[in-house]
Image: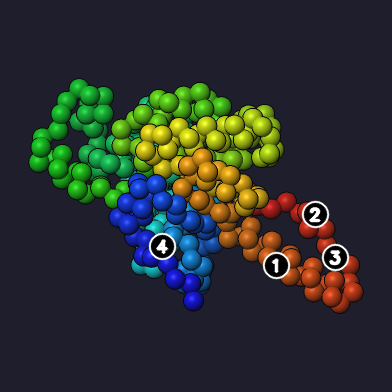
Amino acid sequence: MICRPTMDAKTLKHHLANGKRAYGTAILTSSPLWPPVVAKTGIDFVFIDTEHIALNRTELSWMCRTYNALHLAPIVRIPSPDPYTACQVLDGGAIGLVAPYIETSSQVRALVGAVKLRPLKGKRLEAFLDGEIDLEPQLNQYLSKRNQNNLLLVNIESLPALENLEAILSVPGLDGVLIGPHDLSCSLGIPEQYDHPRFDKAVKSILTQARNKGLIAGNHFCESAKLHATWAAHGENLIIRSNDLYLFTRALRTEINQMKKELGDSVSDPHGEEDLVI
């Protein structure tokens, strides 16, 4: 039996804030048979992607609430860095969200308003975020208590994001960053060359700068698991290992090839098909 601590929203946030590592995987499958199976794997949280995966609000909400009930904190990547979508995802049961392809501090500031100050909206929210007004003490206390366990992470996955990283990381209310290795490698002009010195330097720089500011430093990677150990030495503490369909494909391909070999049949090329990368 796999034994693991309960990881609800409050526990996960405290765990990561103290620099400890948390382990998860991307869940692309919306089958109701999946959550109790995933809960037996020993992971701490699930990463649900709505940027690349077709999930409607109803599907997403039951997934979030089911994983929550199983003490697997659901973190959702939204399709775009839109504050209104962020609010919808939190209303649906997510404990935190990842905003994709962030390149400016102003994008982060708007998301802070949605994640840390909901349900405040409109001109009052904009004025507060711009430093033009203060909030009443009673309102400030209410918003802080209501949103205290919400996690806000932003994807760092482009050259402009690297160039603006200091400003992005300095926005009050941001909890951390999540590297998007595939898109980052493409933006650097070295697609899927994860052993390239420039890619290695970029990843280590992002992780180090985030941890130096006391922020969560995450990475979602499907290739060599050994690289996670290298990156952990530079501060990676939110580890999203692969995704369910990718792992299923690899495991089944390995077993089928093993059976074919034992039975004397020709073995499929293990690299003959592209794996799903998100």
Where, by quadrant of the figure, is residue 74 drawn? bottom left
Residues at marks 2 and 1, CA–CA distance in whole angstroms? 14 Å
- x and y, in percent, of residue 68 in the image: 37, 63
Helix, strand or loop under label 4: loop
Q: Nearer the viewer, residue 99 or 168?
A: 168
Q: Nearer the viewer, residue 211 or 246?
A: 211
Q: Earlier in the sequence, mark 2 or mark 1?
A: 1
Which residue lies under the disc numbered 2?
A: 272
Circle 1 Cα neighbour tier, 10 Å, few/some/many (<14 / 14–19 / ≥20): few
Residues at marks 3 and 1, CA–CA distance in whole angstroms? 13 Å
Label 1 amino acid? Answer: Leu
Who's the residue at 37% across and 38% down the image? Answer: 214
Helix, strand or loop under label 3: loop
- x and y, in percent, of residue 22 in the image: 44, 54
Residues at marks 2 and 3, CA–CA distance in whole angstroms? 11 Å
Who's the residue at 74% across and 65% down the image? Answer: 254
Which residue lies under the disc numbered 3?
A: 267
Who's the residue at 57% across and 49% down the image? Answer: 229
Which residue lies under the disc numbered 1?
A: 252
Above/below status of 62 relative to 169: below
Above/below status of 134 relative to 194: above
Q: Is residue 252 left or right of residue 24?
A: right
Circle 3 Cα neighbour tier, 10 Å, few/some/many (<14 / 14–19 / ≥20): some
Q: Earlier in the sequence, mark 4 or mark 3?
A: 4
Q: Earlier in the sequence, mark 4 or mark 2?
A: 4
- x and y, in percent, of residue 167 in the image: 40, 25
Which residue lies under the disc numbered 4?
A: 72
